[in-house]
Amino acid sequence: MPNADTDNRAVLFPVRPLPGSWLFDGLDPDRLKILHEAHGPQRRAEARAHLVRAADPNPPVVTLSTGWAFRYVQLVDGRRQILSVGLPGDTIGLDTLVGGGPVYPVQTGRGAVYSEMAHTVATSLVRDADWFRDRAVKALARDRADAERALIRMGQCTAEAGVASVLLELYDRLARCGLAAGHQFKLELTQEQFADLVGMTPFHLNRTLTRLRSRDLVSIAGDLVTLLNVPDLEQVAVLPPGFK
Amino acid sequence: MPNADTDNRAVLFPVRPLPGSWLFDGLDPDRLKILHEAHGPQRRAEARAHLVRAADPNPPVVTLSTGWAFRYVQLVDGRRQILSVGLPGDTIGLDTLVGGGPVYPVQTGRGAVYSEMAHTVATSLVRDADWFRDRAVKALARDRADAERALIRMGQCTAEAGVASVLLELYDRLARCGLAAGHQFKLELTQEQFADLVGMTPFHLNRTLTRLRSRDLVSIAGDLVTLLNVPDLEQVAVLPPGFK
DNA sequence: CGAGAAATTGAGCCAACTCAAAGTCAGTGG
DNA sequence: CCACTGACTTTGAGTTGGCTCAATTTCTCG
């Protein structure tokens, strides 16, 4: 059941997983069929629509076909921290099926096409299908690894290093599912959202981007980001070996 | 097999889990027996000894009886980010059994008494015992929730708020296993390590602690921390409802 | 008591923040 | 087609939180 503030127009074709999906990749036809039947129809969500509401006791599992969505925490004083960003092909909410923990709201960036699996359906899959449970656990493990990488960024990086490393990471993830090439990708976040992701002021983010541009490390035209000099950019994003 | 830089003196009695242990609590006698047999003897580790080496392909699962230990990442330029702190009763490394991901080094604070489960033993337990596997998954989920809370702290908190929130969290965790009471606990970290945990300079941490002291929010005498005014301290540690 | 480690303090600097204002852009309606 | 509007981005000026480095004091332990 989609949320109230999405426009709910169902798209006709079913979930069509992108290459590189952690949930769908490498499954045999039988299991793919089960997954497809578990998902509802594709729906379209407006920019900033909520795909999961804060503290939803039965959060759906959402697979993105198009567009970005991020999980965030809203602080009492209005500040916000974005915990993770979902890109096309990513499945959000598998982690809520195993292990519990708080459920955070999920919002689209510029809008998205997505498909939901109801919480009850996903829960029984976890109970009955080992292969599905395994993938949910793997998702949880990746989430944790990502959170810890973000922790390192926030704790030890300068603004420039943090921004560079996020840009590199976004490019890599998009390239893996064929949505970026030639060191270019579309950034489906406003600078304000980007700032909430890296934990800085939108103003300071803007200046940081400007500096990276003036050094010819990246170019940004509208929402099109081009990584002009990946080696130097990686140099700027000082992180321990094995990280980007 | 313990690591080279611990002193390896085996203590005679076996693992003696503390109340509040996520791994041991609420198990029936049969399973407790299995767990006890899976663990090696208790050993004593010096201050700053490594319980797990960086990128160990077969990291042991370590249960602390006494003392603190933290998981950290060492950056190329010498900086360090502490990812999580293990307290007495905590089991470190369950997460490595499910889901993969990088293995980070684990070091004691002022020293510890601990007991290891060999990686091979733990792996077969995960494979063969559902209850054990469940607890490993739960551990992973807690780790992620903790990492995300830390993320919020680092991204959105001032130094004072971050330090206050860490002190409150440490107290709560210690109190749950009976190692703190009356708003007092022993802080088994140097200020340098504490600084690496909250992502700031030791100097700045020191000033921040001094400020908290001068406001009569906490008192620190040697390693003994006293939370003098918990309500105000919680006020200082501005985080969204449900967080500390 | 002496030596090394940890904690503390001081002075100066730079990164990141705040607030205000102006510029850009896409969409909307006259 | 143009003017208007609201959202987003960019720039400027000034402030401050957090950092660096050096020096001193306190603690711990042999």
Image: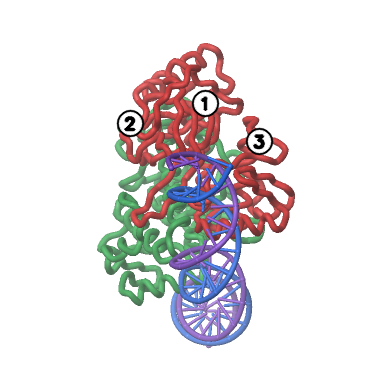
Chain colours: A red, B green, C purple, D blue
The amino acid marked with disc number 3 is Ala
Q: Which residue is mark 1?
A: A23
Where residue A108 sits: x, y (%)? 46, 38
Q: Which residue is mark 3?
A: A180
Dot 1, crowdedness within 10 Å: few (<14), some or many (≥20)? Answer: many
Residue A197 seen by the camera: no
Vertical relation: A104 (above or below) C21 = above
In space, the residues marked 1 and 2 are separated at their CA atoms by: 20 Å
In space, the residues marked 3 and 2 are separated at their CA atoms by: 34 Å
Q: Identify the residue at horizontal 50%, vertical 17% (top origin).
A: A13
The amino acid marked with disc number 2 is Asn
Dot 2, crowdedness within 10 Å: few (<14), some or many (≥20)? Answer: some
Numbered mark located on residue A118 in the image: none
Image-quadrant location for residue A176: top right
Secondary structure beneath label 2: loop
The amino acid marked with disc number 1 is Leu
In space, the residues marked 1 and 3 are separated at their CA atoms by: 20 Å
First along the sequence among labels 3 and 2: 2
Q: Identify the residue at horizontal 52%, vertical 47% (top origin).
A: A190
Q: Identify the residue at horizontal 36%, vertical 35% (top origin).
A: A5
- Asked whether, in this view, residue B172 is left or right of residue B100, the answer is left
Image-quadrant location for residue A54: top left
Numbered mark located on residue A58 in the image: 2
